[in-house]
Every structure is written in C-alpha cells, then in structure tokens.
Amino acid sequence: MSENIIIKPIGILHSELRYRYETPRQGILAGKMISFIQLNSNCNFEQAVKDLEGFERIWIIYHFHLNDNWKPLVNPPRHTRRKVGVFASRAPYRPNQIGMSCVKLEKVDGLKIFISESDILDGSPIIDIKPYLPYSDSFPDVKTGWVKSGMENIFDVVFEPIAEEQCKWLMQTAAINLTNFARLQLEFNPTDATRKRISISQTADQFQEPMYILAYRTWRILYTVDIERKTVSIKHIESGYTAEELLNVENDKYGDKIVHKIFLDRILPGSK
C-alpha cells in the first residue's frame, strides 16, 4: 500500500469569508450569502457538472488550506468546555486537513457553481463534489454524542440604523463585512466575556444595561443583550485606535489607519 495519496484540486472556492473567525459553526448558519466554486478549465469539467443542477443540496470536499498542523484533542467552540478527540469533531485541525460541507446549490453556470449556506473559506481548494441524497445521507434520529443542537439558544442579532449605516460604509469602502462577522460571533453566547474577542465596556454606570464590545481586528462593535428576548442589539461601530495611535502613521501594521481617519472625519454617528 502506497504511503502517499496524490489529490489534485478540481477548482477554487470564492467567498466573502476570508478569515477563520468569520466562518459560522456550521454552513446552515451562514444564511443567504453566495459563494461560488470556479472549476479548473481544460479538464472536461463542463461535462462533469451535467445534471448537477437538479439537486438542491450538494456535498463539497475541500482542503483546509490555512492549517499546517493537526491536533489530537480540540476545544469545540460552544458545545462544551472540555476537549474532545478531533475525530469526534468537525474542527479543521485534522491529520489530512480535509473538510466536508453540505451546502445549498443555487445554480450552475458553465464552470462556476454558485452555493449558499456554506462555511468554506475563500481560496479553499475544492477536491470533489457529490450530490446530497436524503434517503441515504439523513439520519435525524441518531445519537450525536457530546454534541447538542443548541439551536434553542440562538440569539437574533439586529442592527440599529446607525450601526447598519456604518457597516454598509465599511463594506463599500474597505470590503470589511462586520455585519456577517457580528451575526456569526454573537448568535451564540453573546455575553461570554471569557472569549478573547468579547469584553464589557467600562463606560456604562451601574444603572445602565451592560454594553459589550466585540473586537474585529482594529474595529470595535458595541452591543447590548436582551437575555429574555434572546436579542442582540448592535448599537454602533468604533475605531479600535486611540487618537495618539492614529497620529503615528509610520506604525501601521494593518495598513488601515487611512480608512479609520476617513471613518472619523466623516463624523459617522457613534464614532470617536
């Protein structure tokens, strides 16, 4: 038996999800965001996709291209505080770095396959595509070990008009998708300040409802939480830089201080 197996990608996935912390726990939580697979040309794949469009859902086999190591034990994001074996999880830290997602097929256009409800990162090499068959692929009543649904604890993430305007401006100006990031990060456990991206604002007094801060690189998303109604309200967006840091233009690690300055100069509501 050969020790090596050579697999050649059949295409590349293009998506708005560029960073690992932007991806949903499962593809079904990604909503209506559209991604597409660009199949390789000159491989006769035009014939390979024949009749694929008749399926509503498909399996995508792909490579976790941003991972270069594996872990025998992993810490799942929300179901448990204890580590579990990587083979008992869907974590990307696998010996062969192979991912599998069941996504919704939107349309096939030549060598482009458009999909939604996907948790696959931009630039992921695609290894294979297979149709989803409910009669053989679905077993809704089986045991799921340590994994619980958790869907009963999902929060509705809503944006105040100010925050919506700010997110729209950042998307159009700098291709920063804070809307999608906030929804994916806050629909579960939005008050858990032990997570490295969430903190509690120190500006609110004891009579006000807590204001939480979600960090996205050099940006800060401020929000409140209604536990009873299971609602997260995004109030506004702030720059993560101080005024002094913005003056030091030579030290621009992320190359985004100009965007922050424009953001502040426009005096967008809620900005510093």
Image (cartoon, rainbow, N blue to C red):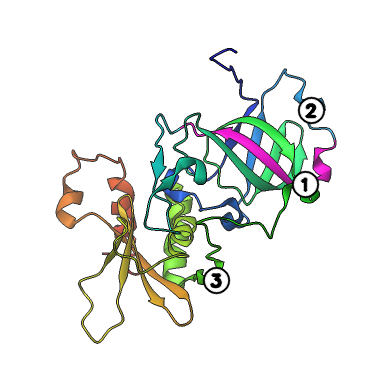
Measuring 17% from the left and 49% from the top, which residue is drawn there? 247
Please tell me how crowded label 2 is: few (under 14), some (14-19), or many (20+) other residues with Cα within 10 Å.
Answer: few
User: Which residue shows up at 65% across the image and 50% down it?
Assistant: 116
Q: Are marks 2 and 3 in contact (CB under 8 Å)?
A: no
Q: Which residue is mark 3?
A: 152
Q: Nearer the viewer, mark 2 or mark 3?
A: 3
Q: CA distance from mark 1 to mark 2?
A: 22 Å
- Who is closer to the viewer here, 140 or 166? 140
Label 1 Cα crowd, 10 Å radius (few <14 / some 14-19 / many 20+): few
Looking at the picture, tell me which residue is in the foreground, 4 or 144. Answer: 144
Which of 191/141 is in front? 141
Is 183 on the left-hand or right-hand side of 116?
A: left
Residue bearing the label numbered 2:
48
State the extent of the magenta-drawn residues as a range: 51-65
Numbered label attached to residue 211: none
Give the CA distance from mark 3 to mark 1.
27 Å
Q: Nearer the viewer, residue 97 or 113?
A: 97
Sequence order check: which comes first, mark 1 or mark 2? 2
Circle 1 sits on which residue?
136
Residue shown at 47% from the left, 43% from the top: 91
Secondary structure of the residue carrying tag 2 is helix
Question: Secondary structure under badge 3?
Answer: helix
Look at the picture and state if 236 lies above or below 25.
below
Q: Tell me where residue 62 sits by quadrant.
A: top right
Q: Is residue 47 above or below residue 196?
A: above
Left or right of residue 97: residue 54: right
Spot the residue most to the bottom. Answer: 207
Q: Is residue 191 above or below residue 131?
A: below
Q: Position of residue 34 (x, y in %)?
A: 63, 48
